[in-house]
Image: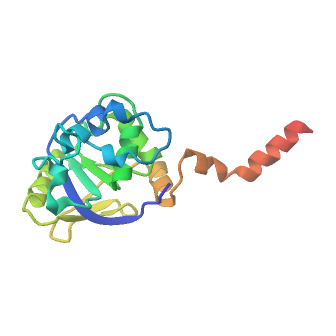
């Protein structure tokens, strides 16, 4: 898992509440057996017209000023619906490192940390201010500092965010559940050796 310390990136906004995992990655793309390759199908039904290949010019992520965006701002209850981990994989594979919203669905929120995507909860007023700042037409950038738990734009916006200490440490060091367990490999090996003898 890629570690996360300080990330600066272009912001994309998704002005929708209750974005569910089926909208993030539609079910017909869940046949892949690896974690990669899902980014091309992210928000597929919104990003493309009915032919499935032509970009929908009305969809937020297709705007020229958000190309290459790595920070997504959304409304409340982002990631609702089914528990598919593929939704996080698709966001990550597309290039997003952080999602900022007033609230997240619990399972999506937990899956994000397990896969190196940072979900940041800010107040509705702060999220609204970010939407306003990002809506001015130019590429809008934010800096997410996980070490100091801040989001800032260098233009007067700076907010702190809360995060569980153990999840913060895992992201800072790029440790998923397996990698965290393997930090104790010598103890595991010794325990197994004792079980055999």
Q: In this view, does 43 lie above or below 130?
A: above
> Which residue is outermost to the top?
82
In this orientation, which residue lies closer to the viewer: 196 or 14?
Answer: 14
Residue 189 in sight in this render? yes
Q: In this view, does 87 lie to the left or right of 194?
A: left
Q: In this view, does 159 lie above or below 58?
A: below
Q: In this view, does 164 lie above or below 22?
A: below
In this orientation, which residue lies closer to the viewer: 33 or 121?
Answer: 33
Residue drawn at 12 percent across, 55 percent down: 129
- Which x, y percent locates residue 76? 21, 39
> Which residue is outermost to the right?
197
Residue drawn at 19 percent across, 43 percent down: 48
Q: Is residue 53 left or right of residue 56?
A: right
Dividing the picture into quadrants, the one containing residue 19 is: top left
Residue 75 in sight in this render? no
Q: In this view, does 58 lie to the left or right of 195?
A: left
- Which x, y percent locates residue 88? 38, 43
Dividing the picture into quadrants, the one containing residue 84 is: top left
- Which x, y percent locates residue 110? 41, 39
Q: Is residue 44 left or right of residue 139?
A: right
């Amino acid at each position: 898992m890629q570690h996360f310390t300080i990330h600066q990136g272009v912001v994309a906004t998704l002005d929708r509440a209750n974005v569910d995992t089926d909208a993030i990655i539609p079910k017909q793309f869940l046949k892949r057996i690896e974690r990669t390759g899902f980014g091309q199908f992210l928000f597929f039904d919104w990003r493309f017209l009915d032919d499935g290949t032509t970009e929908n010019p009305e969809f937020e992520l297709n705007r020229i000023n958000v190309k290459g965006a790595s920070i997504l701002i959304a409304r409340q209850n982002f990631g609702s619906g089914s528990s598919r981990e593929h939704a996080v994989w698709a966001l990550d594979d597309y290039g997003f490192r952080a999602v900022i919203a007033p609230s997240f669905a619990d399972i999506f929120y937990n899956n994000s940390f397990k896969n190196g995507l940072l979900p940041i909860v800010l107040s509705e007023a702060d999220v609204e201010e970010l939407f306003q700042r990002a809506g001015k037409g130019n590429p809008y950038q934010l800096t997410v500092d996980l070490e100091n738990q801040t989001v800032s734009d260098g233009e007067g916006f700076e907010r702190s965010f809360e995060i569980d200490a153990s999840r913060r440490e895992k992201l800072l060091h790029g440790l998923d559940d397996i990698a965290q367990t393997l930090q104790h490999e010598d103890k595991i090996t010794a325990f197994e050796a004792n079980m055999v003898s």
